[in-house]
Amino acid sequence: MALHRCDPASDEALAARLLALQRAAYAVEARLIGDDRIPALHEDLAALRGAGLRWLVADDGTGAVTGAVAWRVTPDGLDVDRLVVDPARARRGTGRALVTAVLAEAAGARVTVSTGRGNTPARRLYAAAGFRGTGEREVLPGLWVVDAVHDGTA
């Protein structure tokens, strides 16, 4: 697996592959949490390309995108906006590698993330990487997320 930066705003073909991957990954999360109102699940190509995120993509060496992580730089550090892994390749280290890379990118700065309260695999992934829960919030009526932070020391 190789990790590399990309800019879907300047590469429409890559953006289309990321959108397909994102929809597949968030469809799994929607099933896990019992709610399909995840905003990224319904995002279109223009919104993905215009999100203003920094992206890191995992590929299998053949050009197939197997996972991706996108974040924003904030005054407090980095905020992970999305982490997606091809469901056919789940639990093979792609998510862990992407989270590790984001933590390296943060260079010890604070990293925040949110995931569906019922998304146990994602919560375990973040906990194993040293994130600690900071609370829960209802983002839409009945749709709860768990917030977590990594302070750069774990």
Image (tube, rainbow, N blue to C red):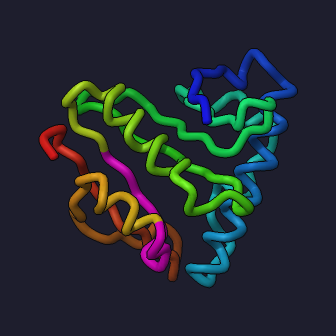
Specify whether 79 is left or right of 143: left
Q: Give the residue at x 19% y 30%.
A: 108
Q: Give the residue at x 48% y 41%.
A: 98
User: Is residue 113 part of the magenta span, yes or no?
Assistant: yes
- Residue 124, x across and y down, in percent: 37, 68
Q: Is residue 101 above or below residue 122?
A: above
Q: Give the residue at x 30% y 28%.
A: 106
Q: Is residue 10 above or below residue 50?
A: above
| Quadrant in which residue 8 is drawn | top right
Q: Residue furthest top?
A: 10
Specify whether 122 is left or right of 53: left
Q: Residue furthest left?
A: 153
Q: Quadrant of the N terminus?
A: top right
Q: Please report the bounds of the magenta region as a residue range.
A: 112-121
- Residue 152, x across and y down, in percent: 18, 38
User: Is residue 73 part of the magenta span, yes or no?
Assistant: no
Q: Give the residue at x 75% y 56%.
A: 23
- Residue 118, x across and y down, in percent: 47, 79
- Residue 139, x across and y down, in percent: 47, 66
Specify whether 64 is left or right of 92: right
Q: Is residue 82 above or below residue 7?
A: below
Specify whether 68 is left or right of 41: left
Foreground: 83 or 66? 66
Task: Please state the total of marks drawn on the protein image.
Answer: 0
| Quadrant in which residue 47 is drawn | top right
| Quadrant in which residue 56 is drawn | top right
